[in-house]
Amino acid sequence: MRKRILSMLLAVCMVLGFAPTTVWADSCVFDRPDGTVEVWGVISYYYTVGEPFRAKDIGLNYHKHDGVQYYGDNLEFWANGNPIQDGYKFKEVGEKTITVKRGNWTASYQLQVSPVLNGSLKDCAIVKQPAKTTYRQGVDGFDPKDIVVQCTFTDGSTQNLGYQDLELYAGSRGMRDFKDGVFIKDGYRFKEAGEKDLIIRVCNKQMRIPFTVTQVLTKDIEKVEMVQDPAATSYRVGEAFCMDEYSAQCFYTDGTIENFDGKALTITANGTKMYDGYHFKEAGTKKVVVRLGDYETTYSMEVSK
C-alpha cells in the first residue's frame, strides 16, 4: 500500500512538473525536514515590464513532523528588498529576488523581468556602441545612454532596444557569464580599477563590450584640501553613514583644480571601509581616515547606543 501511495504521488509530481503555462514551486513536498519553509503555488518566474505581479497565486508551506501547513493569506512580499503587493507592475528589467513572509516564516525565489518584445526572439546584436568606454574609479558615473541593441525575431522582423530595456552587468575582463558580474545602471560608479567587460543581456541572449576603469588620480598632485568637513561628528548604533558629508579639492601641478565628493574618497572608520548607508554596529570612538591618492586626513567620531 505504501509503495502504491508513493507511486501515485510521484505520478502527480511528474504531471505538475510538465504543466505548460505555470510552474509549481518544488512540486514534491512530502519529503522535507521539520521547520522547512518554502514558496508554493502556481508561480510565474517570468514577467515583462509593466506586467502586474500575481501575488494571489503564491503561498507558503511550513513543514513539521505531523504534516504540512499551507498559508495563502496575510502574506507580505518584497522584490529586491522593496515591498510590493498583488498587482504591482515591474518597472525595470533584470532578475529580482522575491521574498515571501508570513509572521516568522520567510522564503524566497528568483524572478526574471524582461522587456516587452514584438515577437519570438531569435538573436540580438549591438548596433550602437557606448560613446564612453573609460571611467575613473569612484568618480565617473556609468553612461549607457548611447547603447542600442537590435533584436531579430523568428518571423524576420526586428526591434531596437535602448539602454532602459537592457540588463547591464559589469565584471572583470573575460568573465564567462552575467552572473559573474554586478548589475549596474546609469550613474553607477566603479569601485575597482582594471580592464572590465560589460555584458548586455536580453532574455537569454548575452553581448559583450570591453571597457577600462582607471585610477582616481591620473595627473600629478600638488596638494589636496578638504572643502567640506563632516557636519555629523556623532552617530547612533544602527544609524546610516552619509558619504555626502565629505568633499575634497585636488590641485594638480599643471594648474588645474578638481573637486571630489565623498563617494570618490576612500573613507574608513577604525579600519572598516565606509560606504553610503553603512550602519554602525558598535558604540565607541571611531578614528575616521579620509584618503585621496597619497593625501590623508583624520577625524574623530563618536557612535553612541
Image: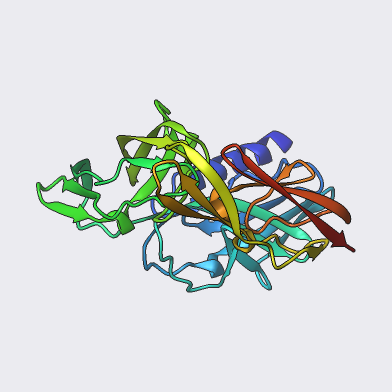
The x and y percentages for residue 120 are 22, 49
The answer to which quarter of the image holds residue 205 is: top left
The answer to which quarter of the image holds residue 253 is: top left
Asked if residue 227 shows in the view, the reply is yes
Query: In the rendered image of this protein, does residue 76 appear above or below residue 189?
Result: below
Q: Residue at x 55, y 72 (%)?
A: 85
The total number of labels drawn is 0
The x and y percentages for residue 251 are 48, 48
Task: Tell me the quarter of the image containing the C terminus.
Answer: bottom right
Asked if residue 45 shows in the view, the reply is no
Closer to the camera, 113 or 180? 180
Closer to the camera, 144 or 102? 144
The x and y percentages for residue 195 are 40, 29
Q: Residue at x 62, y 53 (%)?
A: 108
Q: Residue at x 32, y 58 (%)?
A: 164
Q: Residue at x 60, y 37 (%)?
A: 294
Q: Is residue 52 left or right of residue 203?
A: right
Closer to the camera, 106 or 34? 106
